[in-house]
Amino acid sequence: MTVSEMDNWYLKQEEPLKSCLLALRSVIMGHGPAITTVWKYGGPFFCYKGKRFCYLWVHKKLKQPYIGIVDGVKIDHPQLLQEKRSRMKIFLVDTDKDLPVAVINKILKQAIALLPD
């Protein structure tokens, strides 16, 4: 998938989802040059040194964007939800509020720390 096709995934989202997802992408990519994006399962996945650690998606029932943490089951954080997933947990984002950037950064740092060097 080309960059323009991946960008299209964000751009075809309705507001306020689009702005929120773009802001989340920026926060995730802000974790350094070792972060890259790949297209998997119909959405953007983020890798750290080639290892997938999180992804962006929209919750089907709640219509809220979220960050999915690949090994979220290994992270104990009160705002991470497991739902019916065995390995992943999600961090739901309320589009009507400011992004909780400090909380997101803390969770992302924990997710990156779980990856092998």
Image (tube, helix red, strand yellow):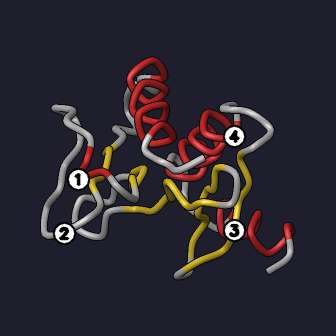
Q: Amino acid at mark 4?
A: Met
Q: Pinpoint residue 42: horizontal percent, then vertical percent.
A: 56, 80
Q: Which residue is mark 1?
A: 73
In the displayed structure, would residue 90 be above or below residue 59? above
Q: Which residue is mark 2?
A: 86
Disc 2 versus disc 3: distance between alpha carbons?
A: 22 Å
In the image, what residue occupies the spot 39% across and 52% down?
Answer: 69
User: Residues at badges 1 and 4 in contact (C-beta under 8 Å)?
Assistant: no
Q: Is residue 98 visible?
A: no
Nearer the observer, disc 1 or disc 4? 1
Nearer the observer, disc 2 or disc 4? 2
Q: Amino acid at mark 1?
A: Val
Decide which of 91, 109 is in the foreground and name it.
109
Q: Amino acid at mark 3?
A: Val
In the displayed structure, would residue 110 be above or below residue 64? above
Disc 1 versus disc 3: distance between alpha carbons?
A: 22 Å
In the image, what residue occupies the spot 20% across and 68% down?
Answer: 85
Q: Which residue is mark 3?
A: 38
Per the image, label 4 sits on a secondary structure element best described as: helix
Q: Residues within 10 Å of mark 2 (few under 14, many from 20)?
A: few
